[in-house]
Amino acid sequence: MKGRIILPEEIANAIWLMSLPKASAINGTTVMADDGYSSFKGVDGFQAE
């Protein structure tokens, strides 16, 4: 974690990555573009175990 707000360009890069033909096998999932924040706090705000 970088301890900063994610830039719009970084979100755009994640979207661009998922739009590539080589990413066609990735579907039905949520891509977390939060600089690893949810790995430490958990998606629902509680501490991950």
Image (cartoon, rainbow, N blue to C red):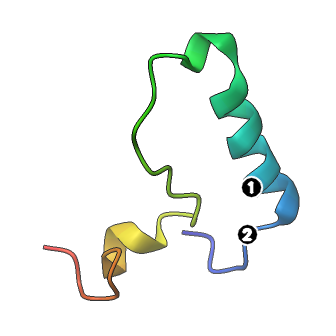
Amino acid on which the number 2 mark rests in the picture: Ile
| Residue 45 relative to residue 8: left or right | left
Q: Is residue 25 above or below residue 15?
A: above
Give me the residue at 13% from left, 73% from top. 49
**Image check: 34 left or right of 25?**
right
Position of 1 with respect to 46 (left or right) is: right
Q: Are marks 2 and 1 in contact (CB under 8 Å)?
A: yes
Residue 42 pos. (x, y %): 30, 76
Could you tell me residue 14's position as x and y percent?
Answer: 68, 44
Mark 2 lies on a secondary structure that is: loop
The kind of secondary structure element at disc 1 is: helix
Image quarter hosting the N terminus: bottom right
Whole-percent x, y for residue 15 in the image: 71, 42
- Residue 6, numbered circle: 2
Q: Tag 1: residue type?
A: Ile
3D distance between C-alphas at marks 2 and 1: 7 Å
The image quadrant of residue 7 is bottom right
Label whose residue precedes the other's in the sequence (2 or 1) = 2
Seen as rendered, the residue at the extreme top is 22
Bin the neighbour count of mark 2 within 10 Å (Cα to Cα): few under 14, some 14-19, many 20 and up.
Answer: few
Foreground label between 2 and 1: 1
Q: Is residue 25 left or right of residue 21?
A: left
> Where residue 11 is drawn, which disc sits there?
1
Instruction: Name the residue rendered at 74%, 55% in the picture.
Output: 11
Which residue appears at 50% of the width and 50% of the height? 31
